[in-house]
Amino acid sequence: MKWKNAFAAALAAVLIIVSGKVPTPGILPAVLLPVAAHEAGHILVLKLYGLKITKLSLEPVGISVKYTGIVSLRREIMAALAGPVSGILYSLSAEMIGKNTGIIWLAFSANLSLVLS
């Protein structure tokens, strides 16, 4: 699953650079913000459940979050779903802000967030 996300982000960045639809300075935040929103969702739920985040690491297939504590299956599922849910919320917000402000890369970022979610 994470390979798909990394591949989709890389492919999207290449397509945007080639097509010229998004100004080059907007590419980095357009790709990083959806990833950050997704991971923040996981981390927020883990913290709400009282778990301690021990390590965040960037890996070739995505970001890995290590934590300590015992978590039930239900809470594990909730933490897993929190990433896609926060990605969708980011997408809706970025799309609305992008349309209202004319910031082209935000609209792209919103679409990328849906793909990653």
Image (spheres, rainbow, N blue to C red):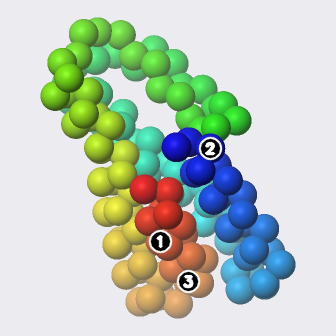
Can I make out residue 82 in this image? yes
Q: Which mark is residue 42?
A: none
Q: x and y percent of residue 78 in the render? A: 22, 36
Element at label 3:
loop
Instruction: Tell me which amino acid carries mark 2.
Output: Trp
Q: Which residue is mark 1?
A: 110
Residue 47 appears left or right of 95? left
Q: Which mark is residue 3?
A: 2
Between disc 2 and disc 3, the foreground one is: 2
How crowded is the residue under tag 2: few (<14 C-alpha within 10 Å), some, or many (20+)? few
* Alpha-carbon span between mark 2 and mark 3: 29 Å
How crowded is the residue under tag 3: few (<14 C-alpha within 10 Å), some, or many (20+)? some
User: How many numbered callouts?
Assistant: 3
Between disc 1 and disc 3, the foreground one is: 1
In the rendered structure, which disc, 2 or 3, sits on the residue that comes first in sequence? 2
Can I make out residue 106 in this image? no
- Taking the spot 44% from the left edge, 42% from the top edge, the residue there is 39
Quadrant of image for the C terminus? bottom left
In the image, residue 70 sits, relative to residue 38, either above or below, namely above
Instruction: Tell me which amino acid carries mark 1.
Output: Ala
Q: Which residue is mark 3?
A: 103
- Taking the spot 59% from the left edge, 84% from the top edge, the residue there is 104
